[in-house]
């Protein structure tokens, strides 16, 4: 896959670096009964976006009541370039939760291999509450939403005052989504998305599902495989969450279960050690001890933030949280080594009274991006709905400071960053539940083998998530990759062609295959100093301006 395609995929995944109704969780067999009771809908396709076809379909809000209230689901497809050799449809999901699958499918020509584009219609089904589907809306107005989100308008809280505000905002958000957000918040768990995808599979005429899901989309893929174990042809999950950890228990915050913080810290320290070994001719941050120097730079920002020009006559304050978030965003890239060390070197230079240029472009839109304005933007509410109704969470938002402190000791820098991802889910304030949520088992023997893909240095979906998910699955193959960044597809020839061949043929690779051909950091000399000032131009801006990551896992 061309590098340009992989960068577009990475950008999509990163921009999109986690009591109520009482009912028994839905079983896998029950899910088949529920969806089979819904007649196959007719999709009224129409031309859209020049290269695609769009449709919307009304599906049951509650699958236990197939003739009851409906919710509107958006579907988009980019048709196969070679209809004569068409295999069927390839359903894709970019993760999040909160990412738009229709927009991801629309971008398929920019990140999927030509072999897949030739032979598959690429289909995106926007999850409930998200994108072009009927949207979750937890507040009656933008004004009411802004009042709450302003309390959470930091990448993650660091000071006591920020924690107090964040907790207050988390509680208000949980209550709003449990009241004003209903009824959709009570019927938008991952299980509902899997059911919607199953009905749309029938609607597009496929006998069995072919699926490629990234990051949180790996949870959706594993849910489908266990809820409908005989109904997929080929299924790939890349950047994998262990579904049992995703569901979790009420004693642990989400990052205690997923260990995303550990993944980010592992990747960062490896980069800094390789930087040290490569030396100053290949790494801009190699002088001295990079691990200790990075800690000094980060810790100084806690008490002494630095100002960067924003390119529009103003400045952007780079705090500790902004810096860590920028580093996490850089870790999502296949070029993580160069980007992480460049950011660290730039901040260090400013701390010592020097000047900088590359980082300016990354923060240029920061002020505008922080503003909440018309129209109503529901990304945070949509992702929260899935996280909060899929899993179990501690009772009180006030318990998050102690839990995130513990996580940050275990995984410095990123334990706190990832740890605050689900504070709005505290069960005493987020009280709405999905009566049709699926909580397992995730150990079903599927009729066909599916493919689990993990890369060693993923900063969001810990590689151990792929390993442990493989242990759960009686009929799956694990493909591992040595690439950097978030997810493996498109990072190297080996991983990409292995995934492509499986999707094209339905024949999974041997379990335990390892790809080692991905680009590695600090293998070439640095360009001359005169060119370093533009080295970061055109790269993806790290997600440092959101009140918290809208796309928590991809």
Image (cartoon, grey):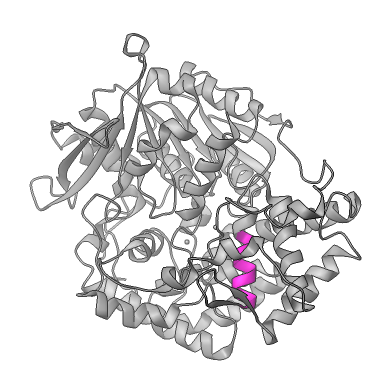
Residue drawn at the location 42% of the way across and 23% of the way down: 117
Q: Main secondary structure of the magenta part?
A: helix
Q: Look at the image and tell me whether residue 514 can be seen.
A: yes
Residue drawn at the location 56% of the way across and 60% of the way down: 542
Foreground of the two, 57 or 426: 57
Q: Is residue 524 magenta?
A: no
- Establish if 12 lies above or below 106: below
The quarter of the displayed image where residue 167 is located:
bottom left
Q: Residue 63 location in percent, x, y?
A: 19, 47
Residue drawn at the location 82% of the way across and 50% of the way down: 528
The quarter of the displayed image where residue 386 is located:
bottom left
Q: Is residue 113 left or right of residue 492?
A: left
Q: Is residue 321 magenta?
A: yes
- In the picture as drawn, the residue positioned furthest to the left comes out as 67
Q: Look at the image and tell me whether residue 429 can be seen.
A: no
Q: Residue 539 location in percent, x, y?
A: 59, 51
Q: Is residue 519 left or right of residue 71?
A: right
Q: Residue 552 location in percent, x, y?
A: 49, 59
Q: Which residues are magenta?
A: 318-328
The quarter of the displayed image where residue 330 is located:
bottom right
- Establish if 539 lies above or below 378: above
Foreground of the two, 547 or 255: 547
């Amino acid at each position: 896959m061309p590098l340009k395609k992989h960068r577009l995929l990475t950008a999509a995944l990163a921009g999109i670096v986690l009591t109520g109704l009482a009912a028994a969780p839905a079983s896998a067999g029950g899910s088949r009964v529920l969806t089979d009771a819904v007649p196959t809908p007719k999709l009224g396709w129409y031309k859209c976006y020049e290269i695609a076809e769009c449709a919307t379909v009304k599906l049951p809000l509650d699958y236990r009541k197939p003739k009851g209230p409906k919710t509107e689901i958006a579907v988009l497809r980019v048709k196969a370039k070679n209809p004569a050799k068409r295999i069927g449809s390839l359903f894709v999901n970019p993760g999040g939760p909160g990412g738009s699958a229709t927009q991801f499918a629309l971008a398929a020509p920019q990140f999927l291999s030509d072999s897949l584009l030739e032979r598959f219609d690429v289909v995106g089904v926007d999850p409930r509450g998200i994108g072009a589907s009927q949207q979750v809306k937890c507040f009656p107005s933008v004004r009411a939403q802004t009042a709450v989100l302003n309390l959470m308008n930091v990448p993650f809280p660091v000071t006591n005052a920020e924690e107090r505000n964040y907790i207050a905002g988390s509680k208000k958000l949980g209550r709003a989504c449990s009241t004003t957000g209903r009824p959709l918040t009570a019927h938008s768990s991952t299980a509902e998305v899997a059911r919607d995808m199953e009905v749309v599979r029938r609607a597009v005429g496929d006998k069995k599902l072919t699926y490629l899901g990234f990051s949180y989309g790996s949870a959706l893929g594993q849910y489908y495989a266990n809820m409908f174990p005989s109904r997929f042809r080929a299924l790939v999950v890349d950047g994998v969450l262990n579904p049992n950890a995703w569901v979790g228990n009420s004693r642990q915050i989400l990052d205690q279960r997923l260990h995303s913080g550990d993944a980010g810290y592992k990747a960062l320290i490896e980069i800094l050690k390789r930087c040290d070994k490569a030396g100053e001719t290949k790494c801009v941050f190699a002088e001295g001890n990079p691990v200790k120097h990075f800690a000094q730079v980060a810790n100084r920002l806690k008490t002494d933030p630095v100002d960067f020009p924003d390119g529009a006559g103003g400045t952007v304050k780079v705090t500790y949280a902004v810096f860590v978030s920028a580093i996490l965003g850089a870790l999502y890239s296949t070029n993580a080594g160069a980007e992480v060390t460049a950011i660290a070197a730039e901040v260090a230079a400013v701390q010592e009274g020097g000047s900088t240029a590359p980082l300016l472009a990354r923060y240029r839109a920061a002020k505008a991006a922080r503003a909440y304005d018309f129209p109503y933007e529901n990304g945070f509410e949509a992702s929260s709905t899935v996280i909060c109704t899929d899993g179990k969470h501690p009772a009180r938002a006030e318990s998050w400071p102690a839990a995130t402190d513990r996580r940050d000791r275990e995984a410095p820098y990123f334990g706190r960053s990832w740890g605050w991802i689900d504070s709005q889910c505290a069960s005493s304030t987020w009280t709405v539940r999905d009566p049709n949520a699926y909580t397992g088992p995730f150990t079903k023997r599927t009729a066909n083998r599916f493919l689990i893909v993990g890369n060693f240095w993923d900063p969001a979906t810990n590689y151990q998530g792929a390993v442990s998910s493989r242990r759960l699955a009686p009929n799956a193959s694990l493909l591992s990759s040595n690439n950097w960044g978030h997810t493996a597809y498109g990072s190297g020839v080996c991983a990409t062609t292995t995934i492509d061949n499986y999707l094209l043929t339905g024949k999974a690779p041997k379990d335990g295959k390892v790809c080692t051909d991905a680009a590695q950091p600090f293998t070439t000399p640095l360009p001359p100093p005169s060119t370093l000032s533009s080295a970061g131009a055109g790269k993806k801006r790290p997600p440092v301006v959101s009140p918290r990551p809208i796309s928590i896992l991809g």
